Image: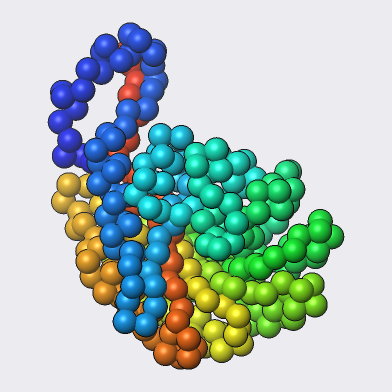
């Protein structure tokens, strides 16, 4: 929860008596404010391309949070079969026109392949083997390809989801082979996706977003059926009171410029997506515990 919030306004002791401790406490008004801010930042039509936002539900998949995301008009990025099912039960539509739910992964685990097919959601393929799995499983429909652009960022290495240290996505120099495999399987590639990490400094984030647009721009010519580009999430969140808050209005300008660049280069309208997860929820919740002893 935002460090500036006065916790005395919440009946913590009464809640603890009712539900026990520890428990999570969420500020619904702040959740709605942040979800709406994301939707506003990535909403509407640009000069050449449309903007849209997904919620990366791995950040928090509670039904209450999903309901607020849906009410704000956000779509979903899911990373497991269970997340797909939770999103569907929360009222997010299946289907590809539009692809409200996108399943992003590097492998199909557990029931994920069956769920993607049965729930009719867009698979975002992070490794060539997934194309074979889709074909063997009887999937018939479009796909997205996740690109590893060769660079990334993060406050720790585990949050760096681009570059040679990351398992995520298909290496940018090998994306042509994955495209050929998709063609042979009969899968049109309707979207390109990349996510380079979470937790960078503001300047680093903006620089890498612009750099990522350049990488995707160079690839887009080879994908004539692609109609959208997803630049991932990772929007910086100010955890401390003295930390600079990210300029979302400036980010919208960056996105509009990127949509124009990609659309003009491709010679067709390209929709641009982002998929923040941490940013809309990080400041809206707190873990409440009880002190049982002092030593």
Q: Residue at x 16, y 39 (%)?
A: 4
Q: Position of residue 186 (x, y in %)?
A: 76, 74
Q: Quadrant of residue 131?
A: bottom right
Residue 15 versus residue 53 in the image, above or below:
above
Q: Residue at x 80, y 77 (%)?
A: 184
Residue 182 versus residue 32 in the image, above or below:
below
Quadrant that contains the C terminus: top left
Q: Is residue 45 left or right of residue 161?
A: left
Q: Is residue 49 left or right of residue 132?
A: left
Q: Residue at x 54, y 54 (%)?
A: 101
Residue 170 versus residue 40 in the image, above or below:
below
The residue at the far front in this view is 97
Confirm whether residue 91 shows in the render: yes
Confirm whether residue 112 shows in the render: no
Q: Residue at x 53, y 69 (%)?
A: 193
The residue at the far top in this view is 17
Q: Is residue 165 left or right of residue 26?
A: right
Q: Position of residue 183 (x, y in %)?
A: 75, 78
């Amino acid at each position: 929860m935002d460090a500036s919030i006065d916790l005395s306004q919440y009946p913590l002791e009464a809640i603890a008596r009712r539900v026990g401790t520890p428990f999570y406490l969420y500020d619904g008004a702040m959740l709605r404010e942040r979800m709406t801010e994301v939707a506003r930042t990535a909403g509407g039509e640009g000069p050449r391309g449309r903007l849209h936002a997904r919620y990366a539900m791995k950040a928090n998949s509670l039904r209450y949070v999903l309901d607020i995301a849906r009410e704000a008009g956000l779509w979903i990025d899911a990373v497991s079969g269970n997340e797909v099912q939770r999103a569907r039960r929360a009222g997010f539509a299946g289907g590809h026109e539009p692809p409200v739910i996108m399943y992003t992964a590097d492998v199909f685990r557990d029931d994920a392949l069956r769920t993607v097919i049965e729930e009719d959601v867009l698979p975002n393929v992070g490794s060539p083997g997934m194309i074979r799995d889709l074909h063997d499983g009887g999937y018939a429909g479009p796909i997205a390809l996740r690109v590893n652009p060769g660079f990334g960022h993060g406050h720790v290495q585990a949050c760096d989801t681009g570059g040679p240290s990351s398992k995520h996505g298909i290496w940018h120099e090998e994306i042509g082979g994955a495209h050929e495999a998709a063609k042979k399987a009969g899968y049109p590639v309707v979207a390109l996706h990349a996510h380079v990490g979470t937790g960078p400094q503001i300047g680093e984030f903006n620089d890498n977003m612009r750099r990522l647009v350049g990488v995707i721009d160079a690839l887009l010519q080879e994908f004539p059926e692609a109609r959208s580009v997803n630049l991932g999430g990772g929007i910086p969140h100010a955890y401390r009171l003295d930390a600079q808050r990210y300029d979302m209005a400036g980010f919208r300008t960056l996105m509009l410029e990127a949509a124009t660049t990609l659309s003009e280069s491709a010679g067709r309208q390209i929709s641009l997506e982002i998929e923040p997860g941490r940013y809309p929820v990080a400041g809206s919740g707190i873990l409440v515990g009880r002190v049982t002893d002092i030593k």
